[in-house]
Image (cartoon, rainbow, N blue to C red):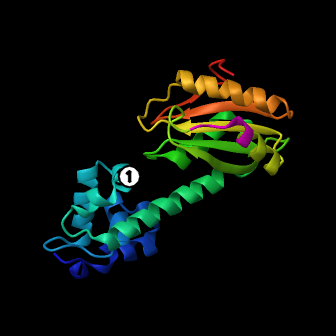
Amino acid sequence: MNITSWPVTERPREKLLAEGAANLSEAELVAIVLLSGASGLNVVDLSRQLLSKFGGVRGLLSASKAEICQVSGIGEGKFARLSAVKELGNRYRLAEITRGDVFNGTAATKEYLRVKYLNQDTEVFSGLFLDSQHQLIKLEELFVGTIDGAAVYPREVVKKCLHHGAAAVIFAHNHPSGIAEPSHADIAITGKLKAALQTVDIRVLDHLIIGDPNITSMAERGLL
């Protein structure tokens, strides 16, 4: 049955306006984003099909353009709307997480990075530059590629810290494999960076290895 034939109170958009988003199912919420169904499927049924195929909301929003557009009735427009929803959600969570003195706690820092680098398929080495109160000044992606394959230059990192007026820094990089174990190269470059930054009185608080779903703190492992 076409959704326009449904009672008004059962249509996803009208239901959201009347009862609030929390009272809608995942399929109904996805239907509002998709706007329209496909041949032989109303938009709610199409949403159910997508959620089933990708194993739920996380799988759906993590799927690539090619994967999603393989589904009959899904084109670039629907993919773009799904991508926009995902990015808005990430930005909202990041804005909430970075309010206040969150970088005083490793748990909050891990959550920030989990959101930032979720499903990143390229290894990215980043610096979180902090002031003397450990509030975030800037998160900056410094190098792209594996630590073995892409040079991480301590001199350039020192320059970045001085540029941002940082009193401390947390390093982080993701392992696209999902395994959050520090490699020998990770440990070695952390030691070099720490030694270089000590010369300008900037503390290295941690180096976090981001996997999925785990994040390993080298400080907690006693590797700093």
Observer-nearest of 51 and 134: 134
Relative to 175, 51 lies left or right: left
Relative to 175, 193 lies left or right: right
Q: Position of residue 135 (x, y in %)?
A: 78, 46
Does any portion of residue 174 appear in the rendered image?
yes
Q: In which quarter of the image is residue 76?
A: bottom left
Tell whether position 202 is magenta: no
Q: Where is residue 180 in the image (x, y as percent from the top left)?
A: 49, 29
Residue at numbered disc 1: 62
Above or below 154: residue 72:
below
Observer-nearest of 201 and 4: 201
- Kind of residue indicated by mark 1: Ser
Does any portion of residue 102 appear in the rendered image?
no
Above or below 23: residue 215:
above
> Which residue sits at x=65%, y=40%?
109
> Which residue sits at x=44%, y=74%?
18
Above or below 40: residue 136:
above
Observer-nearest of 40 and 119: 119
Q: Quadrant of residue 14?
A: bottom left
Range covered by the magenta-colored residues: 151-156
Relative to 10, 139 lies left or right: right
> Which residue sits at x=62%, y=23%?
188
Q: Position of residue 57 (x, y in %)?
A: 36, 53
Relative to 207, 68 lies left or right: left
Tell whether position 152 is magenta: yes
Kindly give the residue lying farthest to the top in the view shown. Answer: 222
Q: Position of residue 216 (x, y in %)?
A: 56, 28
